[in-house]
Each structure stands twice: as C-alpha cells, then as structure tokens.
Image (tube, helix red, strand yellow):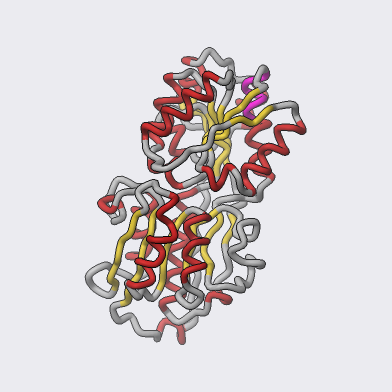
C-alpha cells in the first residue's frame, strides 16, 4: 500500500474553565444507542472503530466505564421501525446524556424527551429538524454532523461521473428514511443537473446483509452503472459486506468514508468520521460537567479527503484519469 500526500485532520481538545473542571466527576449514566451495531460492539474493544474511538476519547477525558461512568447500551439492530419503541426504553433508563447516531433515530429520541440532553451523530441536523442553529442549539440535541452540507452529495456524484464517464443510472444505497429525506432529494436534484438518473430501491427493515444483496442485485438488474453509498449507520456497520457485494457485482461505487476504501472499495470523498466520534465524546464530557445544550455547538465536518483504491479500479477495468489522481489526497495500491 502506498499513501501519498494525505494529511489527517487534527483534533483539538477544548480547554475547559477551571469552574467546569470542579464539577462532580461522580459516576454518571450515559446511554449509547446505535441504529445497527450489535450490543457486543458498543464498547471500546468491539468491532466498530467509531465506537472504539468514542470510548477511547472519553477515557482520555477521565470518563471511564466502571469507575465514574455507567454505560447503558441499546441497539436497533438495523430495524428503523424500532426507533420509536427503543427510544421509550432508553428514556426509562434515566440517563444523564444520550448518545445516538443516524438522523431518524435521533429525531425519534428528540420526540420522546425534551429534557435529557442528546448528543447526536447525524446528517444535516437543521435539514432533519433537530435544531435551527448549529452554533447555539435550541432543542435538547447537540453533537456532530457527518454531512458537510447537502451539496456534498452532488460533489460525490460528479466525482463518480469523472471516474465513470458513461454513468447515466446511479443507485443510491441507503435506508428508506434517508432515501425519502433531504439526502435523497439533494442527490436526485444533483443527478438531474448532470443528466444522471438516481435509482433505488432503498434499504428496508431489517437492514442486514441479505437486504444489501437484494437491493444491489435489483440495482444491477435495473442497469445501474454506478452506486453512491449513503452515510446511514447500517452502511458502516456492514461496510465489509457492502464493499464485497459492489465488487462482486462490478458496480463502481463512491463511498462516504475512507474505511470502505481500506476494505477494498473503489473511491471515497470523505470526512474523518472517527474524528467526529471523538468530538462527540467531548460534547458528552461538557454536558456531564454541567454545560447546557445551547452552549455546546454542533460541529459540522468541513475537511474532506479524496481517497482512491487503484487496485480496485484496475479490477473493475477503470482507468483513473490523471486529473483525478492528481487531486487525490491518498492513493491506495
């Protein structure tokens, strides 16, 4: 593997006022609610690098499970229809802070409580109605946004077209709520602007490997000549399956995160998602120290990296244009 000119985003730790440091570090209860990862992976040594990063950062902040932190874990197991019911269970556990991912799940939690602070790892929180302000959240939801603006989907589509000039029908691989929401609308508009039809079907419950095979097979039958993978949580949980299936079906695919390309995926125009989960840990720490949600801004990712797996491109018979290779932050060979 050769890596060229890639500079990872640096995470800057906020310096808290001395008064805040004086807040109690007695044992507090945090609920972590994941849309798709199994409960066994919602810990520092589980098989989810994002959750690992979150707990690692919490420990660096002095928040250690079993010492001064009680963690209650919940998973929707890839069932979006379980979000509302599970939200009620989470509220009943009486956590001091809730950490949850995927916009529809966070929205369900917001509907279930207006008092417990929620740290969300979501797409555009304004577009999804979670708040009206990133700098000063006006609900009980703060956290981080994995979406560097809805226009990002158009940029990803344009880069895929650059790599696959013949692309005219591109599948959007994501859960139904995202397909029918702001992300789906944004990528459909971007497709119309450059003459690309965005096709489904969306992923339906339960969102697990057999459902990915069904959807990708249908996209192939519907003559998709490219795929864009959405940033919904199940896509990351089952990233190895998604990469294997898109390669098996010979579908040139744009992924939302670098991790997919490391697994053998073709290309990603991506934020540093692990860094965002570390930032989410800082949000939790600030809230546990007594900070108000309105005083904890929602961080929106802005730095993106273009990562191309040249071996995958070769296997797909795709020459990487020199103009694209020169713009890449990282070439994986």
Q: Can you give x and y, in whole percent of width and height, for residue 243 in the image? A: 43, 29
Q: Residue at x 68, y 31 (%)?
A: 158
Which corner quadrant of the image does residue 236 belong to?
top left
Up-down: is 244 above or below 136? above
Q: Residue at x 37, y 38 (%)?
A: 208
214 drawn magenta? no
Residue at the top extreme of this rendering: 317
Which corner quadrant of the image does residue 214 belong to?
top left
Residue 183 as seen in the image, left or right of residue 61: right
Q: Can you give x and y, in whole percent of width and height, for residue 233 in the image? A: 45, 47
The image shows a total of numbered marks equal to: 0
Residue 246 as seen in the image, left or right of residue 182: left
Q: Can you give x and y, in whole percent of width and height, for residue 264 in the image? A: 42, 27
Q: Residue at x 52, y 40 (%)?
A: 174
Q: Residue at x 35, y 84 (%)?
A: 24
Q: Can you give x and y, in whole percent of width and height, for residue 249 in the image? A: 46, 19
Locate the N terminus by quadrant: top left
The stretch in magenta equals 159-165
């Amino acid at each position: 593997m050769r890596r060229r000119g890639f500079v990872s985003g640096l995470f800057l730790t906020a310096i808290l006022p001395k008064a805040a440091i004086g807040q109690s570090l007695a044992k507090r209860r945090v609920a972590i609610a994941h849309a798709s990862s199994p409960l066994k992976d919602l810990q520092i040594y589980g098989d989810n690098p994002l959750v690992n990063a979150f707990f690692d950062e919490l420990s660096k902040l002095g928040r250690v499970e079993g010492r001064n932190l009680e963690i209650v874990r919940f998973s929707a197991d890839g069932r979006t229809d379980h979000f509302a019911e599970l939200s009620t269970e989470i509220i009943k556990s009486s956590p001091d802070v809730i950490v949850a991912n995927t916009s529809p799940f966070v929205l369900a939690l917001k509907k279930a409580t207006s008092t417990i602070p929620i740290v969300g790892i979501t797409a555009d929180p304004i577009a999804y109605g979670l708040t009206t302000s990133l700098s000063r959240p006006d609900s009980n939801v703060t956290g981080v946004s994995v979406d560097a603006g809805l226009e990002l989907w158009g940029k990803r589509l344009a880069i895929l077209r650059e790599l696959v000039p013949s692309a005219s029908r591109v599948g959007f691989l994501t859960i139904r709520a995202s397909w029918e929401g702001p992300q789906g609308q944004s990528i459909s508009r971007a497709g119309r602007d450059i003459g690309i039809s965005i096709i489904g079907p969306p992923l339906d419950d339960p969102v697990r490997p057999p459902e990915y095979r069904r959807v990708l097979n249908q996209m192939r039958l519907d003559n998709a000549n490219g795929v864009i993978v959405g940033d919904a949580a199940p896509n990351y949980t089952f990233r190895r399956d998604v990469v294997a299936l898109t390669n098996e079906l010979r579908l040139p695919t744009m992924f939302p995160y670098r991790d997919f390309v490391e697994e053998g995926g073709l290309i990603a125009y991506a934020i540093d998602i692990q860094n965002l989960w570390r930032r989410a840990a800082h949000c939790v720490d600030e809230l546990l120290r007594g900070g108000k949600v309105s005083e904890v801004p929602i961080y929106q990712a802005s730095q993106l990296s273009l990562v191309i797996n040249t071996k995958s491109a070769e296997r797909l018979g795709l020459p990487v244009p020199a103009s694209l290779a020169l713009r890449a932050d990282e070439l994986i060979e």
